[in-house]
Amino acid sequence: MPPFFAPFKRGPWRYLSDRDVLHAAVVTSVAVVLSLGLVWVGYLVHVWRVAARSPVTLAEPMTTLVFGRRLVGDAPEKDYQQRLSRALALMRSQATEHVLLLGGRSGGSLLSEAEAGRAWLDQHDVPPGVVLQLEQASVDSLENLRHARSLLQEDGPVMRTLPPVALVTSRYHLARCLLLARRLGFRSVPVAAEPALVLNRRYVVRLLAESGYLMWIDIGLRWARLIGHRRIAERLS
């Protein structure tokens, strides 16, 4: 697949065979057409603002979730390395003592994204006392957070209250992760992998793709609430 289309290979687009998700996609497309594209522009501005304004540090220590990325040769590629580097910086500044690495196998890799992330961190002197936990069953951001929620809750009929979490990922990805985390009951703050937002052709494509994902999810949920479609709403809970 050409690099230009890479952002669309994963994420919500892969669910188009699901009739409920397709339902939400049709409603979102109608909203875009009727608004002459202004709805998409609004979501793009939101994604850009979150990307530009998110911090790289934490005001107080908290559990950290690090989102994976498709591996290259069973090793983290550039974006994933930046995410891992940011998590390592938080560990070294004593801003976190519990880190969850998120991501299963993708693209035919022998290792899960979480395993590859731990191997990378092991080569970069993780501070003593930090708990590294792997979530290896997911293939997208929603599943990342669902499984992370399960790992952070105690087994049994009574579930422990979720701790506040830092979401460590690339700037273009933060707005979607924040929306999904809020939907799943997390109290979360964004932490950007990159030192600053730098716009180039690749990054603009990423921002456009992420605003499309976010628009699809958000409008789909709003529509589901409006018409009382519980099954669509339950996709994101």
Image (cartoon, grey):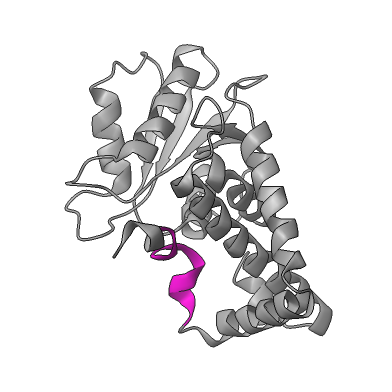
Residue 118: % across, % down: 29, 33
> Could you say which is closer to the camera, residue 48 or residue 26?
48
Magenta-span inclusion, residue 11: yes
User: Which quarter shows the C terminus?
Assistant: bottom right
Closer to us: 93 or 5 = 5
Magenta span contains residue 102:
no
Give the farthest residue toward the right: 226
- Taking the image as shown, residue 88 lies to the left or right of residue 148, namely left
Residue drawn where x is 68% and y is 32% of the image? 53
Q: Position of residue 194 (x, y in %)?
A: 49, 30
- Name the side, left or right, on which 46 lies relative to 75: right
Is residue 128 or residue 219 the one in the foreground?
219
Asked which quadrant contains residue 218, the reply is bottom right
Residue 62 appearing in the image: yes
Which image quarter holds the N terminus?
Answer: bottom left
Q: Is residue 85 left or right of residue 146?
A: left
Q: What residue is drawn where x is 58% and y is 49%?
A: 177
Q: Is residue 153 above or below residue 132?
A: below
**33 shown above or below 217:** below
x, y percentage for residue 201? 47, 47
Instruction: Please report the bounds of the magenta region as a residue range.
Output: 7-16
Look at 71% across and 59% down and name the residue there: 41
Q: Main secondary structure of the magenta part?
A: helix
